[in-house]
Image (tube, grey):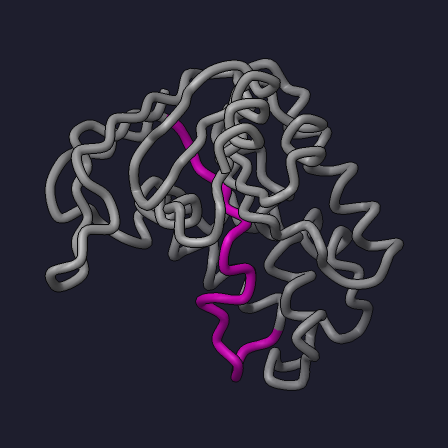
Amino acid sequence: MISANNITLRVGKKALFEDVNIKFTEGNCYGLIGANGAGKSTTLKMITGVTYPTKGEVTVNGTVSALLELTAGFDMKLTGRENIYLRGHALGLEREEIAELEPKVVEFADLGVYIDQPVRTYSSGMKSRLGFAFAVSSDPEILVVDEALSVGDKQFQKKCFARVREIMEKEDVTVLFVTHTSSAAEEFCTRGIVLDHGSKKFDGSIEDAIAYYEGNY
C-alpha cells in the first residue's frame, strides 16, 4: 500500500501541492491523469523519494521499480555492466542479488558488445535501453511508469510494452501509470486519479476518471 497524507509541497512561495491525500492499494493499476503541470510526475517523484514534501507524510510499503529518469545515476566512465552494479548498490541490493539480476538486464537491453564499453560511448537511446532493462528485470511490488515506454526502435518498444504488461498482470503488483493519453490509461489501468495544479479532483474507476477529465478539462 502507498499513502500520501496531508501532502504540501512548496517551491519558494509557490505551492505545487496543498494538503493532498491519496491512497494506492495493492494489486491495482492506477492511471494518474491531468494536463501539463497537474502534478502527476511530481507525485511519482515523491513516492520514489526523488522529491520530498514540505509538509505531510508519504508511506510506501514494498519494493519500487521506477520508469522515470531512465538514464539518471549512470557513471559515464563505467561500462554498462559496471553501471548495473552501481545502480543496484544505490538501491540497497547485495552483490549476490545484483549478480542474479545482471544477466536478465544484459539480455533485455540487448546492447551486444557495448555492454562492456563505457557508457559515455552510448547514444541516448542505448542509455535509455540499459536504464529500462534494469527497471523491468527485477520483480517489483510497486511499478511506477511515467510515459517512459517509447524507448529505442519499434521492435524494442514492443518488447518494453510486453514486459510492462507482464508485470502489470501480476495480482500482487501495484502500478502507478502517468499518461496524457486517455486510451493508454484505459488500456492499462483499473482505477484513475485526476489531478489539477497539485490538487486531487477525482478518484474512481478508470472509466469514470476519464469521463470526469474529458468532461471538465
Residue 57 higher or lower than 117, as above or below: above
Q: Residue at x 62, y 52 (%)?
A: 148
The answer to whether one can see residue 92 in this image is no
Left or right: where 112 falls relative to 41 = right
Q: Residue at x 77, y 53 (%)?
A: 107
Q: Quadrant of residue 139?
A: top right
- What is the total number of numbered labels drawn onto the structure image? 0
Residue 68 higher or lower than 5, as above or below: below
For the N terminus, give its image quadrant.
Answer: top left
Q: Residue at x 43, y 49 (%)?
A: 41
The x, y position of residue 45, in whole percent, is 36, 49
Residue 109 higher or lower than 121, as above or below: above
Secondary structure mostly taken by the magenta-highlighted segment of the chain: loop
The x, y position of residue 153, in whole percent, is 84, 62
Q: Residue at x 51, y 53 (%)?
A: 68
Left or right: where 16 falls relative to 180 = left
Q: Quadrant of residue 117?
A: bottom right
The answer to whether one can see residue 183 in this image is yes
Residue 101 higher or lower than 168, as above or below: below
The x, y position of residue 42, in whole percent, is 36, 49
The x, y position of residue 131, in whole percent, is 60, 59
Q: Nearer the viewer, residue 16 or 47?
A: 16
Does the magenta run of residues contain 71?
A: yes
Does the magenta run of residues contain 213?
A: no
Q: Range of the magenta residues?
A: 62-79
Extreme residue in the right direction: 155
Q: Nearer the viewer, residue 113 or 162?
A: 162
